Amino acid sequence: MAISVKLIDHTKDPIRALYMAYRVCYSALTPQQVLDRIDDERISQEKMLEFVEARLLTGHMSPLEQVHFEFGISGVSRAFSHQFVRHRIGISFEQQSQRYVTYKGGAFPYTVPKTVERAGLGDDMTALFAQAGALYEKMVEAGVPAEDARFLLPNATNTNFKITVNFASLLHISDLRLCTRAQWEFRKVVSLMRAEVVKVAPELGRQLQPKCGERRLGYCDEDYEAWEECPIGRKRPHKSELFNLYDAYRKGELDDLDADDMAIIAADNDDAPAFIR
């Protein structure tokens, strides 16, 4: 079963909701007075967006908890779900039960990773799951409760979710799970969640990046070997490079700009080195 993510509902006009939350913190006006100015267009959508984006740069996070998104998620494995539910703050889960849902005929949906298929073992995995399904059905027919027959089911078994998550939590999830070190299935799910948010609130959707993104940390804080192996690592510095640069600055080891540097800056385009034309 293919992974599917659908945005079910979300905070109406999330930019206005964030503006209201932030403005209450930074204004002598009452919330009602702020709302009146929005309604009579003294405060435009453009001004609200500009204010919200400026506040996002400050790291003031609590207002982000007042914007929520609801998703329906299907076709994901139990291996994924065990990771997903570790996110506990600002997110609520409802998950398909293997206690109350019995797989008829022992046919349960599952995921075969592409790495298994590339290794030429996809058929072997499928055959083993067919055996597990047959035994599951035999157990159920023998009177074993579904809650006990499920002990046989693999981590590959698919499951479904209905979740509600606030924007602060979604940012944190994206920080971690859009990183190329995250498990492929989790990266896929969060990428699809991001795409859904972009459709309804592109100003917020573009904030959802891996933690190395220019709107997040802006650098990689994983171990150096992981940064070297990352396919997008060269687009972002590793934290050790920043620390080394700061240490060199602190020790006075950075060279001052000299006359040659100033000549490059002042050069006409025809005289400038090729790399700055």
Image: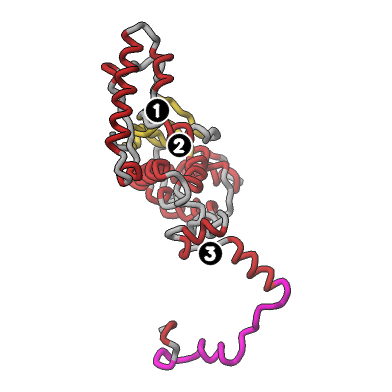
Q: Residues within 10 Å of mark 3 (few under 14, many from 20)?
A: some
Query: Residue 157 in magenta?
Result: no
| Image point (43%, 14%), residue name | 148
Q: Position of residue 136 (x, y in %)?
A: 34, 17
Q: Position of residue 212 (x, y in %)?
A: 51, 56
Front of the two marks 1 and 2: 1
The residues tagged by marks 2 and 3 sit, at their Cα atoms, a distance apart of 32 Å
What residue type is disc 1 on? Pro
Pick the residue in front: 140 or 221.
Answer: 140
The residues tagged by marks 3 and 1 sit, at their Cα atoms, a distance apart of 40 Å
What residue type is disc 3 on? Pro
Pick the residue in front: 148 or 97.
Answer: 148
Vertical relation: 110 (above or below) 236: above
Which stretch did the figure color magenta?
A: 250-271
Pick the residue in front: 21 or 9.
Answer: 9
Quarter of the image containing the C terminus? bottom left
Q: Residues within 10 Å of mark 1 (few under 14, many from 20)?
A: some
Q: Going by the image, does 170 lie left or right of 247? A: left
**Is residue 260 visible from the viewing direction of this image?**
yes
Quarter of the image containing the N terminus? top left
Q: Which residue is mark 2?
A: 68
Q: Secondary structure at mark 1?
A: loop
What residue type is disc 2 on? His
Q: Which residue is mark 3?
A: 237
| Image point (36%, 6%), residue name | 143
Q: Position of residue 20 (x, y in %)?
A: 51, 43
Q: Going by the image, does 251 lie left or right of 221? A: right
* Colour mapping used in the image: secondary structure
Quarter-of-image position of residue 24 = top right
Q: Which residue is mark 1?
A: 154
Q: Going by the image, does 257 lie left or right of 145? A: right
